Amino acid sequence: MGYEWARLIWWLSQGQNAAAIQTVIAGVDLVSTLVLLLVTMRYVTLTKTLAVVAKEQLQTIFQPSLRIRATKLEYYSDVNIEIENLTVYPVYLERVNVLINF
């Protein structure tokens, strides 16, 4: 292994090898730039997906889905109102204002 390093050092110390070294380094630079570009594109895609999923989760948790039914009873002037929570999370209703026109 030491022989190869000594040979590389000798080759690099020669003045006529500068163009070959620049060519090799330019190739390595191009490949590393492409790899970084692909990694960045993948990161952006995953981050966007994560943001969409997080938004959907927050909407599910903080925006309850309620089904509200109002029916007038046949023989009474009363109205039956049913509020059904369609999500698994509990919902706190502080006040309900109802205006029904039959």
Image (cartoon, helix red, strand yellow):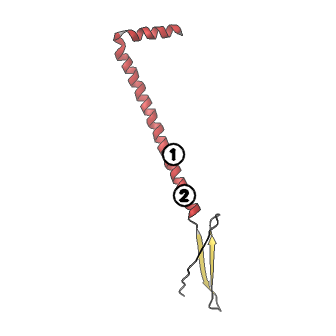
In the rendered structure, are the residues bearing label 1 and label 2 in contact, judged by CB atoms less than 8 Å apart? no
The quadrant in which the C terminus is found is: bottom right
To which residue does mark 1 refer? 46
Q: Residue at 56% across / 58% down in the picture?
A: 58
- The residue that mark 2 highlights is 56
In the image, residue 27 lies at what x, y percent? 40, 25
Residue 78: x percent and y percent? Answer: 63, 88
Q: Residues within 10 Å of mark 1 (few under 14, many from 20)?
A: few
**Three-letter code, disc 2:** Glu
Which residue is rendered at x = 51% and y = 49% of the image? Answer: 49
Q: Is residue 61 above or below residue 75?
A: above
N-terminal label among 1 and 2: 1
Number of the label disc, if any, that sits on residue 84 = none
- Quadrant the N terminus occupies: top right
Q: Is residue 70 above or below residue 76?
A: above
Amino acid residing under circle 1? Leu
Count of numbered circles in the view: 2
Judged from this view, the residue extending furthest toward the front is: 94
Report helix, strand or loop for mark 1.
helix
Above-or-below relation of 90 to 34: below
Which residue is at a point 49% across and 49% down the rendered structure image?
48
> Quadrant of the rendered structure where residue 70 is?
bottom right
Name the quadrant containing residue 94.
bottom right
In the rendered view, would you say 73 is above or below 29? below
Instruction: Give the Cα distance between marks 1 and 2.
Output: 15 Å
33 to the left or right of 77: left
Residue 8 x, y percent position in the rendering? 45, 11
